[in-house]
Amino acid sequence: MLERIRLSVARAAELRNLERQVATSPRARACSIHEITRERAVWRVPVPGQPDRYISASAGHAGDETFAVHVDADAFYLAWLRSDEQCVVRAQMPRDYKYAYAVDGFAQGSANPVPLADVGAWNDERGRTHIGFTNGITRSFWLIANRAPSFPVQVYGRESAELLHRTAGTTQGPVCYADLFTSAAPQSTPVRSLNRAPRP
């Protein structure tokens, strides 16, 4: 019982701090593309005080309804913490039972990048935005716990992608996989940025 109260107090304090921070800070910039081929896209994720980490999307998921959405880590964390009990406060994230796998995965570098988390966003009947995962909770914990400014996630559905972008997106709009992989050259091609928002 005391532990529950302690966790509830910690969550409320974290929410207040995040709300102030997100309200007063500009949104982070999107991660840059490290390489893109017809098979996969790899983004470089800067992490303070550590080597860059790498995260990827597979062309096997390409289609008009699959998007890479670059999220501002703090805005995303705030929206997730508000809406989902599976999201714990930052200090508790390294206690996740699969956290060691995320540590190992992100240590592999650009040769073996970590796949994007599968995320969805929706509004309930009261208009409150919810964040949910199909997979990738622990890798998202790792990125938030290590204070990556932003990172891309994979979202199915244009409406969900646009809502997540409005709620927690970076300065770059969602990128449709159909456009992302159509733009790839046959060989590996470094790309500085892709700033394609979904077509209206």
Image (spheres, grey):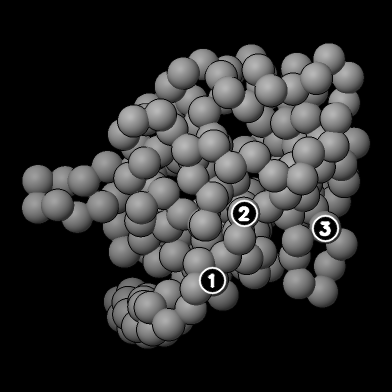
- Please say if 138 is above or below 68: below
User: Which residue is found at the position 50% from the left and 67% from the top?
Assistant: 27
- Asked which secondary structure carries label 1, the reply is helix
Labels 2 and 1: the sequence-earlier one: 2
- Asked which secondary structure carries label 2, the reply is loop
User: Which residue is found at the position 68% from the left and 52% from the top?
Assistant: 31
Residue 164 vs residue 174, the one in the foreground = 174
Q: CA distance from mark 2 to mark 1?
A: 21 Å
Q: CA distance from mark 2 to mark 3?
A: 14 Å
**What residue is pinned by disc 1?**
90
Give the quadrant of residue 58.
top right
Q: Position of residue 61 (x, y in %)?
A: 58, 19
- Please say if 172 is above or below 15: above
Q: Amino acid at mark 1?
A: Arg
Image quadrant containing the N terminus: bottom left
User: Which residue is found at the position 69% from the left and 23% from the top?
Assistant: 183
Mark 2 vs mark 1: in front: 2
- Please say if 187 is above or below 9: above
**What residue is pinned by disc 3?**
52
Q: Residues within 10 Å of mark 1 (few under 14, many from 20)?
A: some
Mark 2 vs mark 3: in front: 2
- In the image, taking residue 100 as reference, residue 52 lies left or right, namely right
**What residue is pinned by disc 2?**
30
User: Which residue is found at the position 43% from the left and 32% from the top?
Assistant: 198
Labels 1 and 3: the sequence-earlier one: 3
| Labelled disc at residue 138 | none
Q: Residue furthest left?
A: 126
- Asked which secondary structure carries label 3, the reply is loop
Q: Position of residue 175 (x, y in %)?
A: 54, 35
